[in-house]
């Protein structure tokens, strides 16, 4: 515990991942990782600020938090930094109207976004939505733009489900990058900008975070 | 014509592409490019050896040649160098059994190939066959191999159809390369090995070909 005390000297806030840290996903919604419900409760009782930083892009924050609360976690929607709402902020700031190649489960996050006459593409882990037709449509939208802009919600290679390894968004982002000769802007981990936005929301400096 | 005479000095053979050179594809099978039927006929009457070198990977050579003959071209199956039969030779030489992520139209080229218990993946322009499920299956096969081997039939970014631009095999190859952290072996243009095999089949040296 002494070692921990030293390591935590000056620390004012803690950023926590969700999948693989609080719970393991899978068919039927997943299960808490042993000890994580109580560990989070202890963190919340401490002096430390707590925020959640996730690349979850198949669920809205509302659905994600609802699921975690049912598993026993003390978490609210406003405490979660996730790629979809972060992307919405960027789209609004830059006056961009996206064509969305995303999972239906996260579509509600974009309810307030104008998607008419698109001038960029947003790609996220669409799972079965990564059909040839949907990929081709996103490709065609990009090729019709004078300055093609592609946002990728994370760039993970793959993840594990109970049924086996599953392709994540990263490979499909690489496909569009190669097809169009462009480079995507990644919103989500490991982008430094994404971590910084989580820290801003927690009102903690980088050197004060763990 | 004098310039052509000089340029052709020492030339003994001509390699011709097919799509975009002999004909333009599209709905309903495509149409000959103006003058190409007669140009090919003249080449065949000359002293020059003629061979066709194509990246066509959605049709078997038999189907491709049948279509071209119906359009009026003097061409036979044995004159065509194409990625699918070239891949079959490599698979046999190296004792490899492929999992095939290919278009149904070219599947017959692999009729003589053992695809049980696969120890490599062959990817070609599968069109609508590039579903999430099919891509994920190819990915899982590669990840289960100690030494993942991926053959890509060409690496084109996209091609044009009457309905618009269409994603070619290249983007999907890049997706699997990124997901697995590997590099594909390209069979087809622009691989030098592929051109060399066409020249060998024509029995002409590189410096004698145009």
Image: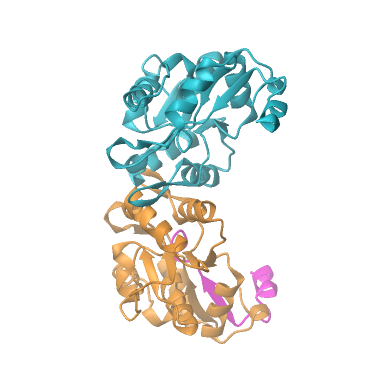
Chain colours: A cyan, B orange
Magenta-colored stretch includes residue A156: no
Q: Which residue is nearer to you in this view: A196 or B165?
A: A196
In-image side of B146 versus B103 (left or right): right
Nearer-the-camera pick, B170 or A81: A81
Work out whether residue B30 can be spotted.
Answer: yes
**How many numbered discs?**
0
Residue furthest to the front = A2
Residue A25 falls in image quadrant: top left
Q: Position of residue B175 (x, y in %)?
A: 49, 51
Residue A162 image point, x, y percent: 34, 48
Q: From the top left corner, tell me how far across and down residue A14 is, in percent.
A: 59, 23
Residue shown at the point (48%, 35%) measured from the top left: A21
- What is the residue that sits farthest to the bottom in this orientation? B203
The range drawn in magenta is B1-22
Is any part of residue A82 visible from this angle?
no
User: What's the residue at 40%, 82% (across, down)?
Assistant: B78
- Choose between B132 and B192: the one closer to the eye: B132
In the picture, measured across the screen, residue A107 lies left or right of residue A122, that is left
Query: In the visual, does B117 lie left or right of A22?
Result: left
Question: Toward which corner of the image does residue A11 lie, by quadrant?
Answer: top right
Residue B16 in the magenta stretch? The answer is yes
**Residue at the (66%, 74%) spot, across then down:** B5
The residue lying at 54 percent from left, 51 percent from top is B178
């Amino acid at each position: 515990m002494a070692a921990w005390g030293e390591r935590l000297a000056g620390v004012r806030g803690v950023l926590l991942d969700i999948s693989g840290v609080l719970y393991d996903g899978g068919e039927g919604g997943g299960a808490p990782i042993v000890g994580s419900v109580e560990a989070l409760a202890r963190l919340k009782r401490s002096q430390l600020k707590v925020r959640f930083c996730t690349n979850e892009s198949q669920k809205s924050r509302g659905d994600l938090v609802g699921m975690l609360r049912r598993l026993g976690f003390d978490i609210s929607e406003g405490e979660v930094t996730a790629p979809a709402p972060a992307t919405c902020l960027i789209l609004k700031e830059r006056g961009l109207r996206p064509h969305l190649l995303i999972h239906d489960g996260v579509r509600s996050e974009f309810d307030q976004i104008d998607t008419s006459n698109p001038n960029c593409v947003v790609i996220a882990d669409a799972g079965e939505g990564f059909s040839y037709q949907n990929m081709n449509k996103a490709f065609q939208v990009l090729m019709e733009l004078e300055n093609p802009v592609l946002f990728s919600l994370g760039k993970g290679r793959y993840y594990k489900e109970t049924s086996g390894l599953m392709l994540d968004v990263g490979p499909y982002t690489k496909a569009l990058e190669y097809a169009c000769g462009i480079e995507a802007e990644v919103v989500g981990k490991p982008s430094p900008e994404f971590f910084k936005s989580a820290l801003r929301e927690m009102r903690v400096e980088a050197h004060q975070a763990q």
